[in-house]
Each structure stands twice: as C-alpha cells, then as structure tokens.
Image (cartoon, helix red, strand yellow):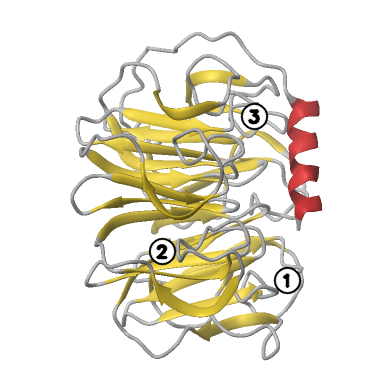
Amino acid sequence: MRRVRLFKFVIAVVAMTVGAAVWTAGPASAAAGSAASVATGYSHTCSVTAAGALWCWGGNGRGQVGDGTTTSRTAPVRVGTATDWTTLEAGTSYTCGLRTGGALWCWGANTRGQLGDGTTTNRSAPVRVGTATWSTVSANDAHTCAVRTDGTLWCWGFNRLGQLGVSPDVVYQATTPRQVGTASTWKSVTTGYAHTCATRTDDTLWCWGDSTSGQLGLGILSYRTAPEQVGTATWASVTAGYTFTCGTRTDGTLWCWGENGYGQLGAAGAYQTTPVQVGSVATWARTAAGDNTACATRTDGSLWCWGNNMAGQLGDGTTTNRFAPTRVGTATTWSAEFALSYHTCGVRTDASLWCWGNNGTAQLGDGTTVNRSAPAVVTIPA
C-alpha cells in the first residue's frame, strides 16, 4: 500500500516542470462545449459539457479516457455519441459516470474488479454496471461505491482492509456491486485509498475500512469492516483523500482528520484520529480531496486549497505545501463542480473549465505536458 503511494509520488516529481505562475483571467463564455461536470484521475481528466456530451484526455494506458483505445490524448476527445451524461467520478486509472435516468457506466483499469462488470478485464470504453439506477458514485484507487436511487449503498473492487463494508475474510475482492448493510437511507458516499465514508439522509456520517492513520475519525488506528457513526454532528459534504478525510458540517464549519504529512488537514501537526476544525470560518460550502491535497469553496464563490502542492495543484502560483487553506486567485465565481488528484480542475459559474497542477501526461488539456501552478482555461470543442 505504501509502495503504491511512493510510486505515484516519484512519478509526479519526475514529471514536474512548473509553468509560469500567471493567472489566465480571460473569461470563457458558456457554450455547447462548456463544462457542467469534471473528474480528475491520477493522469487523466474527463468532463461532461452543458450539452451532455462526454470528453476525456490525458494518460490512457488502462483505457481510462474511454475512447476505445489506450493511446494518451493531449487534448479533449469525445467519448461515444451520447448526450445524456450527467456526472462523473475518476479513480486513479479508471472513470465512472452517470447518465440521465441513473444508469452507471465505468471504464479503464479493472484489475481488482473496480468497474463492477463481473470481470477483472480493463475496458477502454464505457461498460454498464448492471441494470440498477444510481444517484451518486465515488471511485478511488481500486474500489468503487455508489448509492442507488432507492437509498441503498453498494461497493465493489478491492477489500483488503474492509473498505467494501464486509470482512476481507468473507470477501477479499468483489467484481460486482455488494450491498453495504441493509439501510436504505444513504445519501452520499466517498472513497479513499482503502477507506470509505458515507452520509445518511439525516446527515449523520459513517466510515469504515482502513484507519491506520486515523482517517475514519473514530479515534482508532486500526480498521473497521462495517460502517460506524462518526460522532453526532451533521454533515453537508464529506470527501476522502488517500489516508485522510475532510467534511463540511451543516453549520458551515470545515473539519479534517487522518494523516497530515503535507498539511492536508488544514493545520500543522501530527495525524488526527477524530475530526479537528480547520480555522474558525463558518461559510464553507463543499470540499473535495485528492491524494494528499484538499480544496473547498465558500459561500461567496471563492476557492481555497491546502496540503501537497509539489506539482502546483493548489493553484496559488507556487509549489509550496500549505498547512492552511490558501485562496486560489481572487475569483468569486467557482461552482460546486471541482475535483483534484495531483492536478485540479474546477468549473466556474459561467460554465468555463479551468485546470492546473501536474501535467506530465497532458491531463490539463492544453496540448502540452508543462505543469501549471495557477488555473488556465481548458477549451472543449462544442
């Protein structure tokens, strides 16, 4: 597990050539090719346009771009002809997306069954996950979880540390969705490297899987194979990083827990096994995590990032790690649609898409492999 993380770290260092720290301020007007949703894997990016078309670009060695090939793409390429895509989620080397009506499709790496199609065969084009209808999905390194429209929660893929919500002695790997418990009141789900957290319709938070860095928020340094409630607070959004977790509560405060080697908890200090508040601001709207980086929007439309910044993924014009939220430029037009890994992409309220950070496989979609430490517009064909 640690070797995987180190491997990703080394690749990012080798690939890093930081571009000039210049904010690209020119507005990109909303049009047929403008962005409605975005997802970032380790080396690729996908976006759904306002017209419901799916475009992907970047590294494609496992078929994660979804265009039927394993050829890397330095600029956006259209995936199929469908115009009913709604939302996306990207794992390390795979992608999942929902279409109108709730059909779930996944593609890319599948060595642990994370695509949910009953096989461990990589797929270079989208394959449907069963016939059920889904409301939300989360993908990470080798496991996927999703909530169905009936409020039940299902997970599949790798389960070495119980991240699927069942003991690994019972199920070590699942190639098709398995229900987590029997509850039908699940609302959202987020997957880390080997842990999972989810909220219910009463806004309570539940976590399970690996907690050797405290990432479950339960005050433990071991693991759990079934959901356990994290305190009694109510939560508006929760996001799982590699071995840490962050969330915004319904009162607008921001909290993080787990590993903190890069400042990904938004404060200096060691790991935390229970939620710790980030600053004192109570105007946080939504948060999302990458490998060892996190970002969050405030209710004024500003975007803030913190943690690992070795490839410029914080967007502050530097490659300095940050142990507190650092504002990305001065814009107040960031929407709730943003995602990050070693690179970050976000959609503004005018539906323009902006990306920055690691670009070693052209995942920023600008036709180059030069890293950027500040946001730049991505042009998606209409």
**Seen in the image, is 289 located left or right of residue 347?**
right
What amino acid is at disc 3? Asn
Q: Please give the name of the residue rendered at 59% of the width and 53% of the height, measured from the top-left corner.
A: 243
Q: Residues within 10 Å of mark 3 (few under 14, many from 20)?
A: many
What amino acid is at disc 1? Arg
* Image location (x, y in percent) of residue 222: 61, 69
Q: Secondary structure at mark 1?
A: loop
Looking at the image, is 313 positioned above or below residue 5? above
- Picture quarter with the C terminus: top left
* Image location (x, y in percent) of residue 54: 49, 49
Q: Nearer the viewer, residue 66 or 292?
A: 292
According to the picture, the residue beneath numbered tag 2 turns out to be 99
Q: Residues within 10 Å of mark 1 (few under 14, many from 20)?
A: many
What amino acid is at disc 2? Arg
According to the picture, the residue beneath numbered tag 3 turns out to be 358
- Picture quarter with the N terminus: bottom right
Q: Please give the name of the residue rendered at 47% of the width and 18% of the height, measured from the top-left corner.
A: 316
Label located before the other in sequence (3 or 1):
1
* Image location (x, y in percent) of residue 17: 72, 17
